[in-house]
Image (cartoon, rainbow, N blue to C red):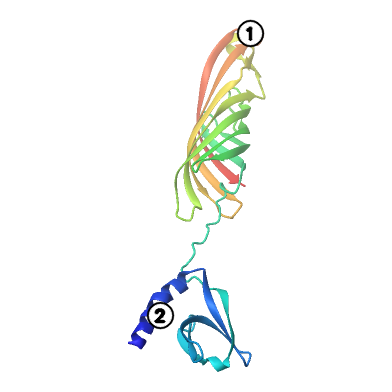
Amino acid sequence: MKHLMLFLLLLITLPFSVNAQHTDQDKVHLKDGTIHTGIIIEQKPGSHLKLLRLPEQDTLQFSYSDVDKITKDVRSIENTEEQPVAEAPTLSESRKILSQIHYYIGGGDYSLGGMGLTLSKPVGNKWLIGGGVHYIGQVNTRPFVDQQDVAITVDVKWRYGQSADKKRMGYISVATGYYFPLNKDFYYEPINGNATTGNTFYLNPSVGFRWDVFKKVGFMVDFGYQLTTATYFSQSGGERLFNRNFDNIAIRGTVMF
């Protein structure tokens, strides 16, 4: 019966002792200088005591004539449960402002190329909202007006999906703003005189794929439709001559950091 009670006590005590961060334990100091730590489960003054050692899961018995003193101790017991590992922040999560350097190529009404810079702020878990400045120019020779422009834009990106490791993701983007022509004046044959270009409207919706190759650097490629509208005026009289839309397909490569 005594052994059964000891076994039941061991079964009850062991789970709590393993899972607890700290457990009050007894320290038995022997007269020879040896110290044993555990829980006293039986104590008969003047005769003996029994000590249950938790890590070793065994029981020691000491004669009171060999015991110098008994003290209390708080002993740390290692928690065997696995602790979740914190995930490293993604590029967007680790930046208050995300810098993006762009390179453009494309074609349609005219062949184009250019570069740009956008600064975006992560908003929530899926949005990047910012503004940029871009130079986009015509790269081929055509009889019509040479398009060399600087664009000031608002850029909005929405992440529609990402991989489990958060390194690859897809975006839908919209950039819109105004073009400021660098070469406003040109010769316009129908009026046998010079004309000038007014400021133009710019719109570029696109779908892109982003890959965070390094911890602090990512790359993105997106494909979009680029629309620019322009109004042309007579340089001499200032009257409006005509409006024109330019439709192009643009491919944009971006380095993010």
* Residue at numbered disc 2: 10
Q: Count the marks: how many?
A: 2
In front of the other: 94 or 169: 94
Assess whether mark 2 and mark 1 are in contact (beta carbons under 8 angstroms): no
Report whether 175 appears left or right of 57: right
Q: Secondary structure at mark 1?
A: loop
Return the x and y of residue 59 as percentages of the image width and height.
46, 87
* First reached walking from the N terminus: tag 1 or tag 2: 2
Residue name at image x 48 percent, y 56 percent: 165
The residue identified by callout 1 is: 238
Q: Residues within 10 Å of mark 1 (few under 14, many from 20)?
A: few
Q: Position of residue 211 (x, y in %)?
A: 52, 50
Residue 168 vertical position relative to residue 43 in the rendered view, above or below: above
Q: Residue 27's spot in the image, x, y percent?
A: 56, 81
- Considering every residue shown, the one lying at the far front of the view is 46
Q: Residues within 10 Å of mark 2 (few under 14, many from 20)?
A: some
Q: Amino acid at mark 2?
A: Leu
* Amino acid at the residue labelled 1: Gly
Asked if residue 167 can be seen in this view, the reply is: yes
Of all residues, the one furthest to the left in this rendering is 1
Residue 144 shows in this picture: no
